[in-house]
Image (spheres, rainbow, N blue to C red):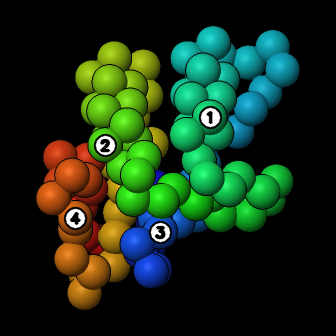
Amino acid sequence: MKAHLQDNILFIAAADLPPYKKGGSMVRNSYFWALKAIACHAPRGGDWEFDEGVWLALARMLMAFSQSGYLGYSETILGLEVDTPIPEVLRAVATML
C-alpha cells in the first residue's frame, strides 16, 4: 500500500485501501473495518490518516493479516518513498518504493 509520512501522520493512499463490499470476502471486509477502526481520519474516497499513537497497533494488525495467508504482500505492506526514513515501529511492515 502506498503511504507517506507528514508531520508524524502516516497517510495510506486511498487507491490502495481495501474496499468494503457488502457480501464480499469476510477477511477483506474485516481488514477494511480493522484499518478504519484505528485510523484517526478515514474520509470516504480520501487517504486515511494514522497518527503516531496507533502505529504499533497498525503494525501488529498488518503483520497478523499478512501472516494469515488470505491477503497478498502488496495489500499488507506499507510502501514509503525512498527518501522517507521508516520509523522503528513500522520497520517490520514497511518498505521503500
Instruction: Please state which amino acid type lies under the numbered disc 4.
Output: Pro
Asked whether residue 62 appears in the rendered view, the answer is no
Work out whether mark 3 precedes mark 4 in sequence or the reverse, and give the earlier one. 3
Three-letter amino acid code of the residue under disc 1: Ala
**Mark 3 or 1 closer to N-term?**
3
Residue at the spot of label 1: 37
Above or below, comparing residue 3 to residue 69 in the picture = below
Above or below for 77 versus 47: above
- For the C terminus, which image quadrant? bottom left
Verify CB contact (< 8 Å) between mark 1 and mark 2. Answer: no
Q: Is residue 32 left or right of residue 44?
A: left
Q: Secondary structure at mark 1?
A: helix
Q: Name the residue carrying label 2.
A: 56
- Residue that protrudes farthest toward the front in the picture: 53
In three-dimensional space, the C-alpha distance between marks 2 and 4, rounded to whole angstroms, equals 11 Å
Q: CA distance from mark 3 to mark 4?
A: 11 Å
Q: Amino acid at mark 2?
A: Leu
**Front-most of residues 77 and 59:** 59
Residue 87 bears which disc, if any? 4
